[in-house]
Image (cartoon, rainbow, N blue to C red):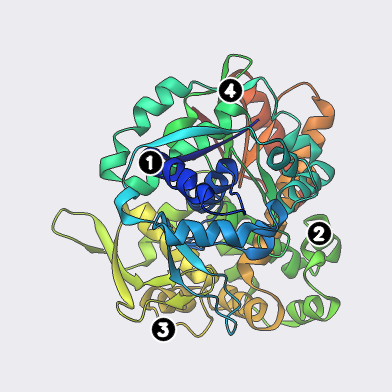
């Protein structure tokens, strides 16, 4: 069975309008197909981050919809004609973007309900070689140790979870939709996985997409879960990269998976850079310090401004699409407020890592003056090799998912194991063991000690 979510009032209207439509045409439309296409507008935003798909403004791929019905356009035209959904942007051939739709405003804050798909032909599409099914098979082939425990024992207390989510319908509707979609997936055990090697190469799953507030309601064989989180993950894996460059150690680059993206000429170029070894070593020691958190240490280097409530803030670029670095022309800058100085510092470090080497942001200039050699290495990678985010994410995925998690799984095949980006997840009784093994195995692979944090859900 496949269960989808749809606005309650919209479902009622759709039933009535479909009956009327089918009375006056030979081309009969089926309710299940119509509901499924509407439900995509609710579900798709839960699969994307960084505004790649904004809530209620969804690009529907004709190629993917065609996988479910060759007659998909008739359904979409019907839904638009009856004002159940609205076409808000036509196909953009120049930018290769699909048509964009949204739920009609009169339904956009309505209660959603679950609807079980029963049409046999449509149900068959969820086991055919569709894009989604191929994605699952790829995950099972590449990282079976991280998907094998998505089974009947992984459950959610849906009643308690829904009680927490219901208030969001009036206060934060996108969060309400997102949470309801994920609760439904867990309740029906309709698991989703994907790997995007062209971007971060992480494993994305129903668990990675689950809101933090809902994790406490998830159990495996009745036991609550928790995770071991790598502290300052991106700076840590960058430090491993820096060590390999300092030592001109190509074997270390191979061990951490960097050579899958760095060509020989890139590596030789990095090895040939004239850098201050002492400065780079100092930076690495800041990252791996077990006395103080890196972000807490680095925050001392920045001039922090506070608002009237005493919270740190800064003005940042306002992207309409962060992934494609498209700036909102109407309001190119926005105020970003942080809960703590550490959060401020983390945001700055991430911007330093992933912004252009020619950025004029004041905090980036401060960092460049403090760590010119580290900045030179960053700039070389960004300008001559590959996006730094992509490289570090691939290194993280190789080390944590394809090495540490795989070795742990082989040693303890019956201990449940999942991943959430830079964390590994298990049941609470196995967390101390997992923490010990992650720290040992990562040191073996990277030759740098790592700081981890245990979190009980």
**Residue pushed farthest left?**
308
Residue 252 tag number: 2
Front-most of 262 and 304?
262
Q: Secondary structure at mark 1?
A: helix
Residue 145 tag number: none
Look at the picture and state if 268 lies above or below 343: below
Residue 155 tag number: 4
For label 3, the residue is 360
Q: Position of residue 114 (x, y in %)?
A: 48, 32
Left or right position of 162 against 156: left
Residue drawn at x 77%, y 77% is: 271
Q: Secondary structure at mark 3?
A: loop
Which tag, 3 or 2, sits closer to the chain's start? 2
Front-most of 106 and 175?
106
Q: Pointer 3: residues within 10 angstroms few (<14), some, or many (20+)?
A: few
Q: For marks 3 and 4, give the one nearer the viewer.
A: 4
């Amino acid at each position: 069975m496949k269960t989808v979510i749809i606005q309650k009032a919209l479902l009622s209207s759709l039933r009535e309008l479909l009956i009327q439509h089918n009375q006056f045409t030979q081309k009969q439309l089926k309710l299940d197909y119509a509901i499924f296409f509407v439900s995509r507008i609710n579900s798709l935003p839960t699969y994307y981050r960084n505004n790649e798909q904004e809530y209620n403004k969804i690009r529907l791929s004709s190629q993917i919809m065609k996988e479910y019905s060759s007659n998909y356009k008739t359904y979409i035209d019907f839904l638009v004609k009856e004002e159940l959904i609205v076409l808000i942007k036509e196909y953009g051939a120049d930018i290769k973007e699909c048509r964009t739709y949204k739920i009609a405003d009169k339904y956009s804050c309505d209660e959603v309900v679950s609807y079980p798909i029963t049409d046999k032909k449509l149900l068959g599409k969820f086991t055919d070689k569709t894009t989604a099914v191929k994605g699952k098979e790829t995950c099972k082939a590449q990282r079976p140790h991280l998907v094998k425990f998505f089974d009947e024992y992984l459950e959610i207390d849906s009643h308690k979870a829904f009680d927490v989510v219901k208030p969001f319908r009036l206060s934060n509707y996108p969060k309400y939709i997102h949470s309801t979609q994920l609760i439904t997936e867990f309740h029906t055990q309709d698991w989703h996985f994907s790997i995007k090697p062209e971007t971060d190469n992480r494993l994305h799953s129903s668990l990675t997409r689950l809101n933090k507030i809902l994790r406490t309601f998830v159990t495996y064989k009745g036991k609550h879960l928790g995770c071991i989180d790598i502290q300052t993950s991106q700076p840590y894996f960058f430090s491993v990269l820096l060590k390999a460059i300092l030592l001109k150690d190509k074997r270390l680059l191979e061990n951490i998976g960097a050579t899958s993206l760095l060509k020989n000429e890139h590596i030789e170029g990095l090895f040939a850079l004239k850098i201050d070894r002492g400065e780079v070593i100092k930076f690495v020691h800041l990252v791996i310090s077990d006395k103080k958190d890196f972000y807490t240490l680095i925050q001392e280097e920045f001039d922090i401004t506070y608002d009237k409530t005493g919270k740190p803030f800064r003005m940042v670029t306002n992207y309409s699409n962060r992934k494609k670095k498209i700036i909102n022309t109407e309001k190119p800058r926005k105020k970003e407020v942080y809960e703590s100085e550490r959060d401020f510092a983390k945001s700055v470090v991430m911007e330093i890592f992933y912004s252009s080497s020619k950025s004029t942001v004041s905090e980036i200039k401060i960092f460049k003056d403090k760590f010119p050699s580290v900045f030179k290495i960053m700039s070389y990678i960004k300008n001559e090799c590959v996006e730094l985010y992509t490289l570090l994410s691939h290194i993280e995925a190789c080390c944590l998912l394809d090495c540490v998690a795989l070795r742990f799984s082989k040693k303890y095949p019956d201990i449940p194991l999942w991943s959430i980006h830079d964390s590994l997840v298990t049941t609470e009784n196995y967390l101390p063991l997992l923490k010990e093994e992650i720290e040992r195995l990562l040191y073996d692979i990277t030759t740098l000690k790592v700081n981890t944090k245990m979190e009980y859900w």
